[in-house]
Image (spheres, grey):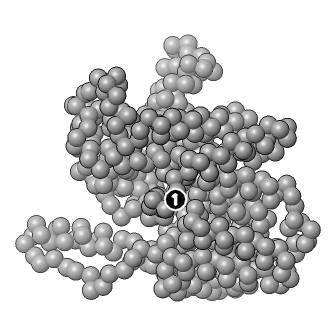
Amino acid sequence: MLFHSLEFFVFFPVVVLVYFIIPKKLKTLWLLAASYYFYMCWNVKHLLLIACCTVVSWISGLLLGRCKRAGRRAKWIAAGSIFFQLGVLVFFKYAGFILQNINAVLEKMGASAWELPFSFALPAGISFYTFQALGYTIDVYRGEVEPEKNLCSYALFVAFFPQLVAGPIERSKNLLGQMRSIRARKIGSLFDYDRIAQGLILMLWGFFLKLVIADRICILVDTVYHAWELYGTVELVVATAAFSIQIYCDFAGYSTIARGAAKVMGFTLMENFRAPYFSKSIREFWRRWHISLSTWFKDYLYIPLGGSRRGTVRTYLNLMIVFLASGLWHGASWHYAAWGGIHGVYQAVGTMTDGMRKRFRERAGTDTRAFSFRAGQVLITYALSLFGLIFFRADSLSAAVGICKRIVTKLDPWVLANGTLLDLGLEGKEMVILFAALSLLLFFSLVREYRNETPEMFLHRQSTWFRWLLLVILFCFLFLFGMYGPEYDESQFIYFQF
């Protein structure tokens, strides 16, 4: 069930209304049933998989609660749960990739290729809910959270439908605590007008990002990337820049809808994006982009590996491991690993040259507070992220390398003046709509960057006439220019494939 489908626009109001009016003791069970139904709409068989991951990690948490923390028995229990969750993820997501690479080696050796005796579809959201269950197990093992004794509360933490399929990857210290407190909430608190209004505004903004911007600009991106051999420097750079907007609006759109839906029901999910393209360094970029995943890797992989505490070489190695893992988390393909590796190199080089660049600026008398300096940092960071996105968006590693070669060798500046850019899938009218929508995106991004306010916070603080004016504009854009309808093939959110 897609957020922007007719089914969801029936499903969500029913779930919320029933949740508000039923007795407290039934609320957790109702939301769990609704979440499982939401997941069953993708594939009924995969419900058994998420149930198994839930039960194994829940039992592991109970057993860990009875053990002496960091004792040998606790280590074996935690390791068993972690091995199970990772085993499920590797089997369903990476079995084909591993076998493909084994067969490539066997082919060079003249041996017969291996084949899987069965085929299966990638379970929706498996990368998200397994990581959430892994985080819970590690938190309990570390003694940072108490084991959850109520299976329904824990199952709802793993399968909560707004963030089940594409995150954000929530921590047990945040979301599980909210699941535990459902029965303690007063009836009056559920009908908080301001909270519900802010949640609906978040959902509206998320739908705007997805349907008006992401699904429109993806036409241009697909046109170029599906036939990249036919295009030169300008078209490929424009398409890559367009993809940076597409993936941001697509994923931030999903996260925003998820946060809004949860807020309507009285739950708070973490902010997953914070104006990432205003970052002044790649290190800062990863503090603003896919925050739930980057902080997950920091807390559960980078720090356990030693972080920056075991010397310079080990720090760089740990960074590369984390970013290669992040790349492969996004997809079982070498071009995703290359994207992660590129960002790992960025981080290592940035850390390595940090002192040298600081001394250079001091000797040159550079005013680091000047607008031009900060703007230059933003532009350089964005350009570096664009180079990485070529490997993320390309269909293969060889295609990514080919695109990079054409960008360097097939210079075609004349297309900026001959109208070629208007022949990349989007006609003049669509380009006007897109630029108008991007203006709204830029406005709210500037508000987020310089006022530190999310869209619903900003609108809540405005005068009634201004708030309703912006809401009407957003709704009209969504209703008139959203990419949906009988002739439109519903586009899944990009991160559903991960």
Q: Position of residue 180 (x, y in %)?
A: 78, 75
Given residues 87 and 142, the one toward you in this image is 87
Q: Position of residue 281 (x, y in %)?
A: 52, 35
- Where disc 1 sits, the SS reads loop
Residue type pointed to by label 1: Gly
Locate the N terminus and report the quarter of the image it occupies. bottom right
Give the left or right position of residue 441, taking residue 456 as reference: left
Residue 269 appears anywhere in the view: no
Q: Position of residue 345 (x, y in %)?
A: 39, 43
Given residues 219 and 327, the one toward you in this image is 219
Tell me which residue sits at (12%, 70%) in the image.
107
Question: Disc 1 designates what residue?
Answer: 485
Tell me which residue sits at (51%, 34%) in the image.
432
Tell me which residue sits at (60%, 71%) in the image.
7
Where is residue 321, by image quadrant? bottom left
Give the left or right position of residue 112, taking residue 195 as reference: left
Q: How many marks?
A: 1
Where is residue 300, by image quadrant? bottom right
Residue 35 appears anywhere in the view: yes
Judge whether 212 appears above or below 408 on screen. below
Locate the C terminus and report the quarter of the image it occupies. bottom left
Q: Position of residue 315 (x, y in %)?
A: 47, 49
Judge whether 270 appears above or below 88 on screen. above
Neighbour class for label 1 at 10 Å: few (<14), some, many (≥20)?
few
Give the left or right position of residue 452, taking residue 288 as reference: right
Where is residue 31, by image quadrant? bottom right
Tell me which residue sits at (73%, 40%) in the image.
470
